């Protein structure tokens, strides 16, 4: 895929759509395109947070380990951002993320992701919106899991 095609791809993601073209090119040039097979982990809870992932195609399941086994808290698809919480929290990964289908993702290093967010208020606001939505969804999912009769 050419750099121009990668830039066109990155423009489709809400978090990067309002970036200046030069920043979009830098983001594409500095990122790595990854492919995962169904069942293949992107990362596990406890791993070092070295990158964020933007889902290009496919779906991934997010689960948290519990004494009773893993609890699925979300399924992420096209245009989703994955792995940003541990990056910004400065903590190890908080969940397992596994490809459900064949998954293509753009892997953005921690440093590059920080630079993009730091220099682009619109991207930072979009990231905050995404995190708030994710927190609400996770809280709802956990609430349903906890209140289910056993």
Image (cartoon, rainbow, N blue to C red):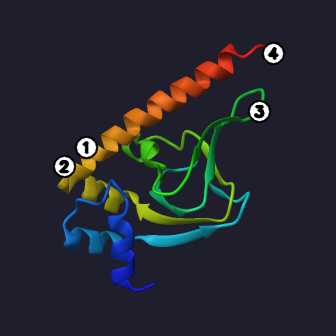
Categorize mark 4 by other alpha carbons within 10 Å: few (<14), some (14-19), many (20+). Answer: few
Cα separation, mark 2 vs mark 1, equals: 6 Å
Badge 3 marks a residue whose secondary structure is loop
Q: Position of residue 64 (x, y in %)?
A: 64, 36
Please tell me which residue is depicted at 32% across the width and 54% down the height of the picture: 15
Q: Are marks 4 and 1 in contact (CB under 8 Å)?
A: no
Q: Position of residue 19 (x, y in %)?
A: 22, 62
Q: Between tags 3 and 2, which lies in front? A: 2
Question: What residue does disc 1 label?
Answer: 125
The answer to whether any part of residue 43 appears in the image is: no
Mark before the other along the chain sequence, 4 or 1? 1
Between 39 and 15, the residue placed more toward the observer is 15
Q: Are marks 2 and 1 in contact (CB under 8 Å)?
A: yes
Badge 4 marks a residue whose secondary structure is loop
Q: Which mark is residue 69?
A: 3
Question: What residue does disc 4 label?
Answer: 150
Badge 2 marks a residue whose secondary structure is helix
Between 57 and 81, the residue placed more toward the observer is 57
User: Which quadrant of the structure image shows residue 74?
Assistant: top right
The answer to whether any part of residue 52 appears in the image is: yes
Question: What residue does disc 2 label?
Answer: 121
């Amino acid at each position: 895929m050419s750099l121009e095609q990668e830039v066109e791809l990155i423009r489709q993601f809400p978090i990067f759509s309002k970036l200046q073209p030069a920043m979009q090119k830098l983001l594409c040039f500095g990122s790595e395109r990854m492919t995962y097979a169904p069942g293949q982990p992107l990362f596990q809870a406890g791993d070092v947070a070295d990158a964020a992932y933007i889902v290009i195609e496919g779906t991934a399941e997010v689960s948290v380990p519990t004494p009773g086994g893993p609890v699925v808290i979300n399924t992420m698809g096209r245009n989703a951002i994955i792995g940003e919480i541990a990056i910004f929290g400065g903590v190890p990964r908080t969940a397992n993320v596994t490809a459900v289908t064949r998954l293509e993702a753009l892997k953005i290093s921690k440093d590059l992701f920080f630079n993009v967010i730091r220099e682009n208020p619109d991207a930072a606001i979009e990231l905050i919106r995404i995190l708030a939505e994710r927190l609400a969804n996770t809280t709802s999912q956990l609430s349903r899991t906890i209140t289910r009769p056993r």
